[in-house]
Amino acid sequence: MTGRTAGRAAGPTPGATPGATVGRTARGGPAPAPSPQGAPAPLRAVAERLAVEHPEARTVLVHTSAFELLVATALSAQTTDVRVNAATAVLFERWPDAAALAAADPAAVEDVIRPVGMAPTKSRRIIALAAALLEHHGGEVPSEQSALEALPGVGRKTALVVRGVWFGQDALAVDTHVGRLARRLGWSAATDPARIEADVVALAETETPARPPVDLTALSLRLILHGRATCTARRPACGRCALADLCPSAGEAA
Ligand code: SF4
């Protein structure tokens, strides 16, 4: 893993509309040939198309610090980003850092985060998380995968999100959208997020080894945006998808 900056779109096209980029790369170069039937979609071409489709590679979780991103991501399990953002707007106002949250009354935190669901569990979890940050890292959020995963309630995906989004490291966080897209694009047959991550990283490293590496953090964030807007779980909109000529599942994924 490298420390490359995440979220920089490659040659965004102002005013680009869904589907308008088919046949052109993000940098305006010649279009890659459509994938042979059943072949995995070429990863770099997908990354370039998505960079045009979603110029701003970003998380929708509102945050102003690594601490806020870590807590918001930890709260985001089995709920919507809208609910998390509504809860954290109040949460971070009252308990803005690890020291404050570690000393918080669990019942008061529970009241504030109730909209995200599983409030008693999540309240205890984020207070324990804040306490661990205080005890082991002076209240700061570490940037190493192992140190992040050692924190209570922090799994691999949350750690990758923090490393990629806040620390600008190359980190492919696999959530439900990234997993679904990876399977539909033919990049992985797995359902286990760690296996999908390994498959996509391996593909990125072998597909075009002589060229600059694909920004995997940006790719992950854009796959999520694409999964929400176009390639949804139940009704993928292949007819207006910018990846349709590259995707082995086009017209068959629903
Ligand atoms: S919407 Fe259809 S064409 Fe686009 S990525 Fe999903 S399955 Fe493939």
Image: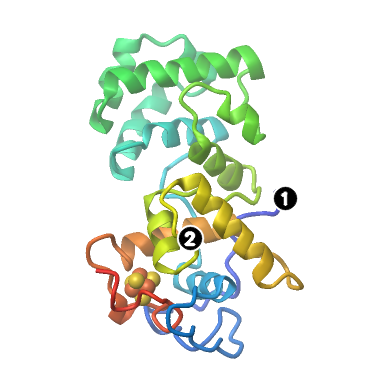
**Residue nearest the observer in this picture, 232 or 113:** 232
**Residue nearest the observer in this picture, 48 or 115:** 48
Q: Residue at x 30, y 13 (%)?
A: 108
- How busy is the neighbourhood of tag 1: few (under 14 within 10 Å), some, or many (20 plus)? few
Residue 132 in picture, x, y percent from top left: 56, 16
Q: Which residue is mark 2?
A: 188
**Vertical arrangement, residue 137 with respect to residue 90, above or below:** above
Q: Residue at x 48, y 89 (%)?
A: 23
Q: Which residue is mark 1?
A: 2
Residue 196 in picture, x, y percent from top left: 50, 53
- Indicate the quadrant containing the C terminus: top left, top right, bottom left or bottom right: bottom left
Question: Left or right: where does residue 6 sit relative to residue 18?
Answer: right
Q: CA distance from mark 2 to mark 1?
A: 23 Å
The amino acid beneath tag 2 is Ser
Q: Residue at x 56, y 47 (%)?
A: 165
Question: Left or right: where does residue 196 sit relative to residue 18?
Answer: right
Q: Is mark 2 within 8 Å of ligand 1?
A: no
Question: Left or right: where does residue 29 sit relative to residue 196?
Answer: right
Question: Ligand 1: which quarter?
Answer: bottom left
Question: Left or right: where does residue 228 sit relative to residue 151?
Answer: left
Query: Mark number for residue 66?
Result: none
Residue 212 in picture, x, y percent from top left: 73, 68
Q: Residue at x 38, y 32 (%)?
A: 75
Secondary element at tag 1: loop
Quadrant hosting residue 106: top left
Of labels 2 and 1, the one closer to you: 2
